[in-house]
């Protein structure tokens, strides 16, 4: 049972971490934005809703990385 749980933590955490990192990267670049002050969309000020999504994506990425680490540690401990 621990092997399945640790594998689920490892795979789920890894998947969520990658997803959170991708969403964070996209929201930092803001390719859909245009602003008169700057030529590059990443230089535009971020809207409050975009900032909230970026914050949540970054938190998810960090927590999912921890979750994957815990799953890997449980799996390694069980293998020993």
Image (tube, grey):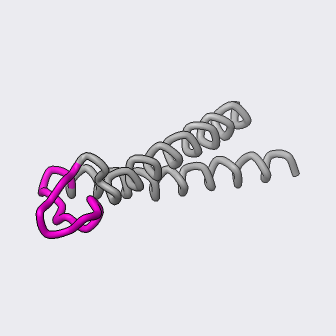
Q: Is residue 69 placed above or below 79 in the rendered structure?
A: below
Q: Quadrant location of the N terminus?
A: top right
Q: Any magenta on residue 68?
A: no
Q: Is residue 58 left or right of residue 42?
A: right
Q: Is residue 68 left or right of residue 26?
A: right
Residue 48, picture quadrant: bottom left
Q: From the image, give the main secondary structure of the stretch colored magenta.
A: loop
Q: Please state which of residues 19 and 44 is positioned toward the viewer in this rendering.
A: 44
Q: Residue at x 40, y 51 (%)?
A: 60
Q: Any magenta on residue 48?
A: yes
Q: Please state which of residues 67 and 58 is positioned toward the viewer in this rendering.
A: 58
Query: How far across and down, in percent of the image, does residue 12 sit?
Result: 56, 37
Q: Please state which of residues 45 and 6 is positioned toward the viewer in this rendering.
A: 45
Query: How far across and down, in percent of the image, does residue 73 sit?
Result: 70, 54
Residue 55, picture quadrant: bottom left
Query: How far across and down, in percent of the image, does residue 52 sit?
Result: 20, 54
Q: Is residue 44 left or right of residue 42?
A: left
Residue range in magenta is 33-50
Q: Is residue 37 left or right of residue 80?
A: left
Q: Is residue 65 placed above or below 10 in the rendered structure?
A: below
Q: Residue at x 55, y 40 (%)?
A: 15
């Amino acid at each position: 049972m621990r092997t399945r749980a640790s594998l689920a933590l490892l795979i789920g955490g890894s998947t969520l971490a990658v997803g959170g990192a991708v969403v964070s990267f996209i929201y930092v670049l803001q390719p859909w934005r245009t602003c008169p002050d700057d030529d590059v969309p990443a230089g535009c000020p971020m809207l409050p809703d975009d900032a909230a999504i970026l914050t949540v994506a970054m938190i998810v990425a960090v927590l999912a990385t921890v979750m994957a680490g815990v799953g890997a540690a449980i799996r390694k401990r069980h293998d020993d």
